Structures are given as structure tokens and as C-alpha cells.
Amino acid sequence: MINDNKTYNCPCCGEAVIDEPGCYEICPVCGWEDDPVQSTDPDYEGGANKMSLKSAQLAYNTSK
């Protein structure tokens, strides 16, 4: 999702800090690397991030 500042929400933490989705940008808030494979398959472990997107979202939300 895009906001008025032309940034996209991080798939992990949801903060609007990603300049272009799927370009392996690292979120400055949660450290998630925006991997298009993991965004498409949130259960996939490996690739740019060791844990799956679902696991990372759960870990981020429980650490708040």
C-alpha cells in the first residue's frame, strides 16, 4: 500500500518506509529485507531473510 509520501508499507512491521516494493530494501524499523519471493509466499523460510514473513511478523508484533 502506498501513502501520500510515496513510500510503501514494510511487509513485516507495516511502517511506511519502503521506497519501492520488492527491491530488497531493508526496513530501518524492523530490519526486514523486502524480498518479493517471501512477500508472495509468506511461509517461505530462506532467501533474503532466514525466517518466514509470517514468523517475522509474529516476532515483531510480540516484541512491541
Image: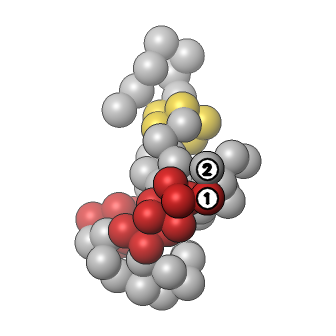
Q: Residue 18 versus residue 32: which sits nearer the camera? A: 32
Q: Amino acid at mark 1?
A: Ser
Q: Is residue 47 visible?
A: no
**Residue placed under numbered mark 2 in the picture:** 64
Residue in the image at 54% along x and 32% along y:
16
Q: Residues within 10 Å of mark 1 (few under 14, many from 20)?
A: few
Q: Is residue 48 visible?
A: yes
Q: Residues within 10 Å of mark 2 (few under 14, many from 20)?
A: few
List x then y, in percent, for residue 39.
Answer: 35, 62
- Residue 7 lies left or right of residue 26; in this view the side is left
List x then y, in percent, for residue 8.
Answer: 47, 34
Element type at marker 1? helix
Element type at marker 2? loop
Residue in the image at 40% along x and 27% along y:
2
**Residue placed under numbered mark 1 in the picture:** 63
List x then y, in percent, for residue 18.
Answer: 56, 40
